[in-house]
Structures are given as C-alpha cells and as structure tokens.
Amino acid sequence: NSFGSKLVRHFVVSFDTKDYITAPEAYIIANQICAFWADRFQVVFGVHQDTKHLHIHFVVNTTSFVDGKILSQSYGELAALRKYVATSYDPFRRESRKIVKAFKKQERDAWG
C-alpha cells in the first residue's frame, strides 16, 4: 500500500425502522454484503442495536490478499456497491412486515 492510500474503507448500512429488520436478519444481510469483496479483500462487520436505527458497520482492508492490488474507490465501484447492498436488503423489505407492526401494536395495547 502506498503512502497516502487508506488502509481500510469504513461504511455503514442503516435500516429504516419501518422495515422492521431484526438483528438476526441484519447479520444475514451483512454476510451477503461482505460477499461483494470477500473473494479478494478482508471484510469485517458489527451489527449495532444500541441506537434508534439498527445499523451495520463494515471495514474493508483495501489491500487484496490475493494479489496485493488496492481496492478501487471509483464512482463506478461505489455505484456497484450501492446496487449490491440494495439487492441484499430487498428480500427483507416485504409487505408482510405490516403484520409485525400490527402485532407490536396489539402487544402494546394488551400490556398498556
């Protein structure tokens, strides 16, 4: 890695509370997102539940363990990552989540 290059890339994926993503689902999504680079770069993540919005922090080693090349940080790479994240997240954003919302409301009303 040359001087001036970042050794790691950090990014966060945050979920809207209206999507009703659970922590176990966030771990599945995180593993899918890691696959974007995992064949060439080390990727680690942490799921955070300690704020209003469930979110995942990712850290990617920018030096490939395969060939020592540096991770591309181009606009095209970022666009591809955004599309990949959306694809990983979409199966969990389903209309049936309204059932969870209705159940939580019933639960609150019952325990009032």
Image (cartoon, rainbow, N blue to C red):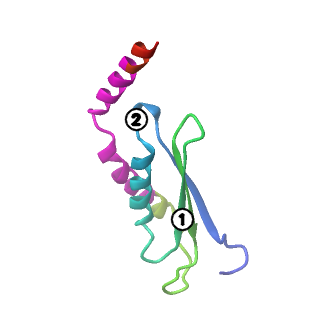
From the viewer's perspective, is residue 23 above or below residue 20?
below
From the viewer's perspective, is residue 49 above or below residue 79?
above
Which region shows up in magenta? 79-106
The residue located at (55%, 51%) in the rendering is: 12
The residue located at (39%, 55%) in the rendering is: 28
Residue 59 at x, y = what percent? 58, 63
* Image quarter of residue 60: bottom right
As for residue 93 lying within the magenta part, the answer is yes
Q: Secondary structure at mark 1?
A: strand
What amino acid is found at the position of numbered circle 2 in the picture?
Answer: Tyr
Q: Residue furthest right?
A: 3
Q: Answer few, some or many: residues within 10 Å of disc 2's Cα (few below 14, many 20 plus, some between 14 and 19).
A: some
What amino acid is found at the position of numbered circle 1 in the picture?
Answer: Val
**Secondary structure mainly formed by the magenta segment:** helix
The image's mark for residue 20 is 2
Mark 1 vs mark 2, CA separation in Å: 24 Å
As for residue 34 lying within the magenta part, the answer is no
* Image quarter of residue 73: bottom right
Relative side of 3 to 91, left or right: right
Residue 58 at x, y = what percent? 55, 59
Q: Secondary structure at mark 2?
A: loop
Residue 14 at x, y = what percent? 51, 44
Q: Which residue is mark 1?
A: 44
Q: Residue furthest bottom?
A: 67
Q: Answer few, some or many: residues within 10 Å of disc 1's Cα (few below 14, many 20 plus, some between 14 and 19).
A: some
